[in-house]
Image: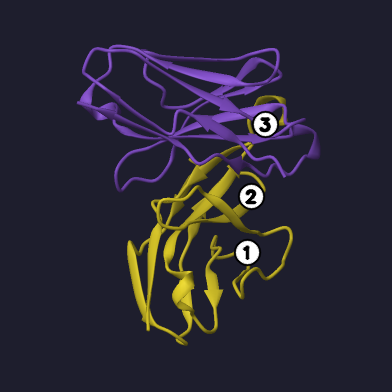
Amino acid sequence: AQRVTQPEKLLSVFKGAPVELKCNYSYSGSPELFWYVQYSRQRLQLLLRHISRESIKGFTADLNKGETSFHLKKPFAQEEDSAMYYCALSARAPYNTDKLIFGTGTRLQVFP
Amino acid sequence: AAGVIQSPRHLIKEKRETATLKCYPIPRHDTVYWYQQGPGQDPQFLISFYEKMQSDKGSIPDRFSAQQFSDYHSELNMSSLELGDSALYFCASSFAGTGANVLTFGAGSRLTVL
């Protein structure tokens, strides 16, 4: 079964603290994983994709196939990071059109 | 750069009415996806179209239908609306030819059923 699990619904930290948003997945094939962010009342935006191995806005995420995890990390949280974060798995569909399967999301609140 | 355009932004309907949402993908994108996000819920995949053909189907109710037109825009038609249909409906588009699919989302259409 294809599934994405984000165990924390809410994560509250103070500015400057490290952040780790957890994501575990279940997928029989070779996974493609993403992190999407949704700021208040805005559209879903791509934050990271595992194949790029890049750092966006100070966030990084490493795919750990052994632990089937794709945790999102940032060493020093900023107030503007407050948002809803969704981990997503790209599941192969017909015609090479992949659909995204989302986790339930984690709300990150960064306090001053 | 042009993004995914959705209309209307907000829509209020009563039970048993019908509603139509429109999505205009990024130019040259050939695939359109529809997602439903209920209050406090994660986005749920409804349906997708590739080159005007339905490519995949998720948890879309039988009361809903969708299609992709020759100009690649897509419409989601919802009939016999129920209170539970109140949600934010996202459209996303992508270009299937790139292999690793990155979906670009629209701002969403918020449907409220009274």
Name the residue located 80 percent from the left edge and 33 percent from the top edge. Answer: B97
Q: Is residue B59 left or right of residue A70?
A: left
Amino acid residing under circle 1: Leu
Query: Where is the C terminus of chain A found, in terms of image quarters?
Result: bottom left
- Estimate how packed mark 3 is, as few (under 14), some (14 to 19) or many (20 or more) residues with alpha carbons within 10 Å: many
Kindly indicate whether the residues beneath marks 2 and 3 are on one polypeptide chain.
Answer: yes
Please say if A45 is above or below B31. below
> Residue A31 got which mark?
2
Observer-nearest of A107 and A26: A107
What's the amino acid at mark 2?
A: Pro
The residue wearing badge 1 is A63
| Crowding near the residue tagged with mark 2, few <14, some 14–19, many ≥20 C-alpha atoms within 10 Å | some
- Mark nearest the camera among 1 and 3 is 3
Rendered residue at 39%/61% (across/down): A106
Earlier along the polypeptide chain: callout 2 or callout 1? 2
Q: Which chain is yellow?
A: A
Amino acid bearing label 3: Thr
Q: Earlier in the sequence, mark 1 or mark 3?
A: 1
**Residue A44 x %, y %:** 51, 49
Task: Provide the secondary structure element on which disc 3 rests.
Answer: loop
Q: Kindly identify which chain the residue marked by label 3 belongs to.
A: A
Q: Chain coloured purple: which letter?
A: B
Residue matched to label 3: A97
Q: Are marks 2 and 3 in contact (CB under 8 Å)?
A: no
Q: Are marks 2 and 1 in contact (CB under 8 Å)?
A: yes
